[in-house]
Image (cartoon, helix red, strand yellow):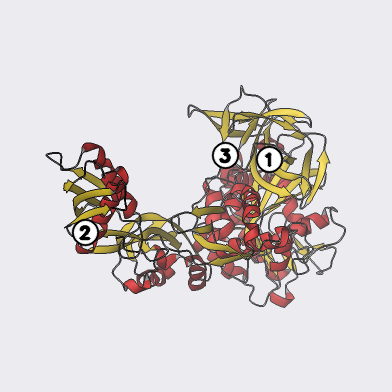
Amino acid sequence: MIKVPIRNIGIFGKDGSGKTTLTESIMFLSSIKKEMGSVASGTTMADFEEEEQKRKFTLHSSVCNTVWNKNTFNIIDTPGYSAFQYDTQSILNVVDAALFVFGADSEISAQARSLYRFAAGRKLPIIGVMSFLDKENGDFAGTLEMLERKLDKKPLILHIPYGEKANFKGFVDVVVGKLFEFPKSKDGSFQEKEIPAELKDRYEELRMELLEEISMADEELMNKFLEEGDLTLEETQIALAKSFQKGDILPIVIGSGEFLMGVRRIMAYLIEWLTPEYLTKKYVAKKADGTIQNIIADSSLFSGFVFKTFVDPFQGVVNVMKVNSGSLTPNSEIFNVATDSTERVGKIYVLRGKDLVEVECANSGDIVAIPKLKDTVTGHTLTDSKKSLFNFEKIEKPAPVIQYAITLSNKKDEDKLSGVMQKIMVSDPTIEIIHDGELHQILLAGQGQIQLQAVQEEIRRKYKIELQYGTPKVSYRETIKGKAEAQGKYKKQSGGKGQYGDCHVRVRPRQSGEGFLFVDKIVGGVIPRNFIPSVEKGIIERSKRGIQKGYPVVDFEAELFYGSYHDVDSSDMAFQVAGSLAFQKSMPNATPIILEPYMNIEIFVEDDLVGTIMGDISSRRGRVSGTEAVDGEQVVKAIVPLKEIMEYEPTLNQITSGNARFTVKFSHYEEFRGDLSTIPQNGEEIQEEE
């Protein structure tokens, strides 16, 4: 017997396209909320964080559980900015279908394109929801053309708009052959009518396109359509469901969460197309030896995947889990495969925005919240016992693309900050805090300016810690291009035992990345063997503070070839100082240079913006190494000095209107050829030793 299925639906799209309003309308029409909230007033169920309400956009994915016509749904609202792509992609990993909301009044963003391709590549069923057709610049035909061009997918039109802009009244549903007219009321009411005469021809044209496309999903129906040229409504719905489940089509429907328009039709489609048989599926897991194991959803084996972790002010750390198979009850024990530890489950909840609603059991397909697991975080697989050792696929955490140096208004908050940042990073694993001992700075790194600004505000509001952001210092390096030699002699007599160390050192450059090499060329015992390591140690310690700007010296060879000692006064310390002096005196004569870090950057952008990107890279002293077409986008690959892209993310958004994204990672060090006065001294000036 097939269990009553749970349908998990993610809502995705560009920020401002209407995702959160669509989520709110579903919660209202399913009677979870008594009144329809709005983003503008900060009263939606999904955007419950204070910072989200202040900024008027989504910062964190939010699960909203509801029941629609006796069918259980988890509707998941997601952020629209690329800075939160890890969170959003993690949701794509656990949903049964996706609603992509496309505003008919604006371009599709780079974030939305990337997410769509990620979902389509996994054959996830997707419905495209076109919003804002009532706006002055709402353009149904233009948006369809844009979607086909930018997503490289021909949309399958299921709704024909009735009226336009201010006179937009509803739509003709191509599947059922009816006009749905909405009075734009606050209760979502509508009138079902016959198709207007002026839309009859367009309806017949699109219906034939629909049948031609979906009949290919079923051989028997395809043969009938080829023979008779038509399908019944029931046959159409069967073929449509099969095509949808295979991820072969991108059906486009019309929806307006603000006026509750089309929401009931969208929910009806999800119930019709996501059949119980389809939802009783297999999940692919990987064993420790790399072999694949298929986990059957309706098996008795419990397994679950944690795709989100957050900190609740009352419950503490809460893990949000998709139950992939079996069932889970309160007060039971489960096994964490990642940490090789047993966890005790206390209470189990379903989520409705910020509200946790306690339940007695979680079954396959459920999304539930479990507080107070001691060793579990995002990306972990949970099973019924240690005998079941496998992991579900997790989304790899991206490397940071932006970072700020942080300072505290109150030094007393330093100890408190560490614990606060642990909570922040549990909720968002893409946030990193870096303690840079070399340059004596604390760095906060992440995926974008908006993300880090939100973190700054959260820390101020929740934990009363004032952070200031600044541009990080750059980790420069120093090296040499020539050869030189010098004597380092340390002699000190102050009564009693003195200090004496004398060494002659040659320095010469090595290839980039080869590091430091010490060469012992002492012959004849002019320096006893036990003091030679002391000379090397002195050189190494002094090389940590370069001659020009105080940055570490790299990629050089130091050859110890002569020296002298005193039978009584020589010591390890004396020869360390002598080695340091020899280094210090030789380096200025060996053509010292400054090295700066260069980064590999890949910018994903549309064809018409490639020239803009290349010009901007050149202005930043960067070098474009090539371009490559990937999934309908151009990837501009370049090497750019780190100094020039410290705050590249907001600049890139500005010059491309948000239609680009990028990745960055360290490449190599390269000679700095600019004005040395622009490079700050690393710490205090190095004092010459006597």
Nearest-to-viewer mark from 2 and 1:
2
Q: Tell me which residue sits at (63%, 49%) in the image.
A: 422
x, y percent for residue 438: 43, 55
Residue 314's place in the image compared with 600, above or below, is: above
The amino acid beneath tag 2 is Ser
Snapshot quadrant of residue 102: bottom right
Q: Which mark is residue 359?
A: none
x, y percent for residue 25: 78, 59
Task: Answer whether labels 2 and 1 touch (C-beta < 8 Å).
Answer: no
Disc 1 crowd rating (10 Å Cα; few below 14, some 14-19, many 20+) is many
The amino acid beneath tag 1 is Met
Q: Which mark is residue 586?
A: 2
What residue would you read off at disc 3?
Answer: 219
Q: Which mark is residue 321?
A: 1
Disc 3 crowd rating (10 Å Cα; few below 14, some 14-19, many 20+) is few
What secondary structure is found at the residue carrying circle 1? strand
Nearest-to-viewer mark from 1 and 3:
1
3D distance between C-alphas at marks 2 and 3: 83 Å
The amino acid beneath tag 3 is Glu
Q: Tell me which residue sits at (61%, 50%) in the image.
A: 425
3D distance between C-alphas at marks 2 and 1: 62 Å
- 23 or 425: which is nearer to us? 425
Quadrant for the N terminus in the image:
top right
What secondary structure is found at the residue carrying circle 2? helix
What secondary structure is found at the residue carrying circle 3? helix
Q: Is residue 232 visible?
A: no
